[in-house]
Image: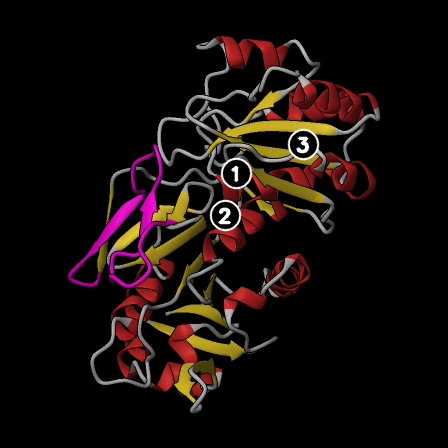
Amino acid sequence: MKKILMIATGGTIASKNNGEGLTPALTSEELLACVPEIAQTAQVTTVQPFNLDSTDVSPSHWLKIADIIENNYAIYDGFVVTHGTDTMAYTSAALSYLIQNSQKPIVLTGSQKSAYLRDTDARKNLADAFAFCADENAAGVHIVFDGNVILGTRAKKTRTHSYNAFSSVDYPNTAIIRNGKPIYYIKPQKSETKFYHELNRNVFVLKMIPGLDCNIFDYLEKNCDALIIESFGTGGLPDYGDGEYFARLKRFLSQGKTVVLTTQVEREGSSLETYEVGRKLLKCGNILEARCMTLEATVAKLMWLLSFAKKDEIERLFYSPIENDIF
């Protein structure tokens, strides 16, 4: 039997209603006891570093999860992380950069309804997560949810209530779970695992809306090392007749800061060469493009890069694919 460490962090899967709404309350042992058949799949040990609604999960928690996995990496055959759905895609992306080329499976799962309820998706998701984690061919960071196995850098929460809450954006599922076993579309590649230990949190996402005041750059210049502009369509900046946005962006770049352009559109990515508003943006300086990367992966990758990379290395490293995050 495979030895698997379950890292319980809270979320809906572990929630009860305290009279003020759902809040994480179930312990890791109670959660595991909800699916007794897992004992036939793997030998499981549990640990609970925190018990939070995933709205409260931050980069410090990503580092904590990665640290637990690294410290136990030689002991266990795989890791299952139970997590709230709202920021699970951010955590899966972050773990993909903090633990690269993992030869062992690191599986995140959760649910849309609490394991405490009779009618819930929690038990199936947890059983599926362990089924994938215990499989001989499993490796790398994935989200397992509603029978889908999604690469950690390609996952996005696309539904707030339905059981099929997560989608793989612009990339196929790694596998599906059918009758308790994974059926692979893509076999994970196993290579040398590398751990990282730092993240730079000074990354800001600016979601463009029509008419947004460009004085937002007063804050950005003082507080951010990198800016992700979530623009319209294939990408660009508005001119509004005065060109002030472009002037402020040039000044931001002149301070040695990093700018990445992405799109608010969920699929098919950015393409700044398509329209004049995009080409004009490229003339402002060295603007990076997220292309088909998810926002979650873009945020996590920048936090990882800025923690160690020199300015002249960032562009090369950003465009270097990690776990099929960009192509």
Q: Which residues are magenta?
A: 157-180
Q: Secondary structure at mark 2?
A: loop
Q: CA distance from mark 3 to mark 1?
A: 45 Å
Is residue 240 positioned above or below 8 on the image? above
Q: Secondary structure at mark 1?
A: loop
Q: Residues within 10 Å of mark 3 (few under 14, many from 20)?
A: few
User: What amino acid is labelled 3 in the image?
Assistant: Cys
- Front-most of residues 219 and 78: 219
What's the residue at 80%, 28% (across, down)? 310
Q: Is residue 307 visible?
A: no
User: What amino acid is labelled 1 in the image?
Assistant: Ser
Q: Is residue 47 visible?
A: yes
First in residue order: circle 3 vs circle 1: 1
Farthest residue, direction left: 179
Instruction: Return the residue at label 3.
Output: 214
C-beta proximity under 8 Å, tags 3 and 2: no
Q: Residues within 10 Å of mark 2 (few under 14, many from 20)?
A: many
- Front-most of residues 111 and 268: 268
User: What amino acid is labelled 2 in the image?
Assistant: Gln
Q: Is residue 78 left or right of residue 320?
A: left
Q: Is residue 46 left or right of residue 157?
A: right
Percent of width and height locating residue 287: 64, 19
Farthest residue, direction front: 241
The quadrant the C terminus occupies is top left
Instruction: Return the residue at label 2.
Output: 103
Q: Is residue 212 left or right of residue 137?
A: right
Residue 55 highlighted magenta (yes or no) = no
C-beta proximity under 8 Å, tags 1 and 2: yes
Question: Which of the two marks, 3 or 2, is nearer to us in this view?
Answer: 3
Q: Secondary structure at mark 3?
A: loop
Residue 191 disc label: 1
